[in-house]
Amino acid sequence: MSAEKDILEYLKKYKYGSHIKYKGVRVGFLGLPDFEYYKNQTLANKCSSLKTKGFIKEVNGNYFITYKGEDYLNKPIKKIFNKFTTNKSKNDPKDLLIIYDVPQDETTLRNWLRRQLKTFHFVMIQRSVWVGPSPLPRFFILYLNEVGLKNNIKTFKLEKGYKE
């Protein structure tokens, strides 16, 4: 097929305002990001955020990616963490205290842990201190070791159940 036919096929396919997306970003004819559909303020805010994080730099009005930005792009995609269930109920005595310290750069892992503790009917006392029914599921504890959190979590069995 000739280039002329390719162009005509493309224009025919996207004649009525439909558009192509690549990785969630609207792209134009050449497959390059089509930034005209973003508000200027949105683009300015995102560029400012990227500069603050050190992912891009601006030289004479032109933006360039930094080594830090390239490293960020090359990082593995977010891991999908397992979900666990429990046979405990909300009314079971809350006699297990969990204290954890997850590193700041592991936000997704920390958020997953909080959601999981809520699933196990734990109650937050402070941001990293939770109390709930014991024991934790065995597979959950094994998984904590697998994702590298085992050493960041301490559990304490309470003599009396915690009352909310």
Image (tube, rainbow, N blue to C red):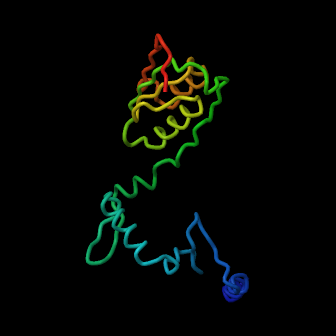
The residue at the point 68 percent across, 86 percent down is 11
The residue at the point 37 percent across, 41 percent down is 104
Which percent across, then down, holds residue 17? 66, 83
The residue at the point 47 percent across, 29 percent down is 148
The residue at the point 33 percent across, 61 percent down is 66
Whether 161 is drawn above or below 20: the answer is: above
Q: How many marks?
A: 0
Residue in the foreground of this view, choosing between 22 and 117: 117
Q: Is residue 151 left or right of residue 117?
A: left
Which percent across, then down, holds residue 164? 49, 27
Whether 70 is drawn above or below 17: the answer is: above
Residue in the foreground of this view, choosing between 46 and 161: 161
Q: Is residue 31 left or right of residue 58?
A: right
Res 4 → quadrant: bottom right
Toward the left, the furthest residue is 60
Res 129 → quadrant: top left
Image quadrant in which the N terminus is located? bottom right
Toward the top, the furthest residue is 159
Q: Is residue 133 left or right of residue 73?
A: right
Residue in the foreground of this view, choosing between 163 and 30: 163
Res 152 → quadrant: top left
Toward the front, the furthest residue is 164
Which percent across, then down, holds residue 156? 44, 16
Which percent across, then down, holds residue 128? 40, 32
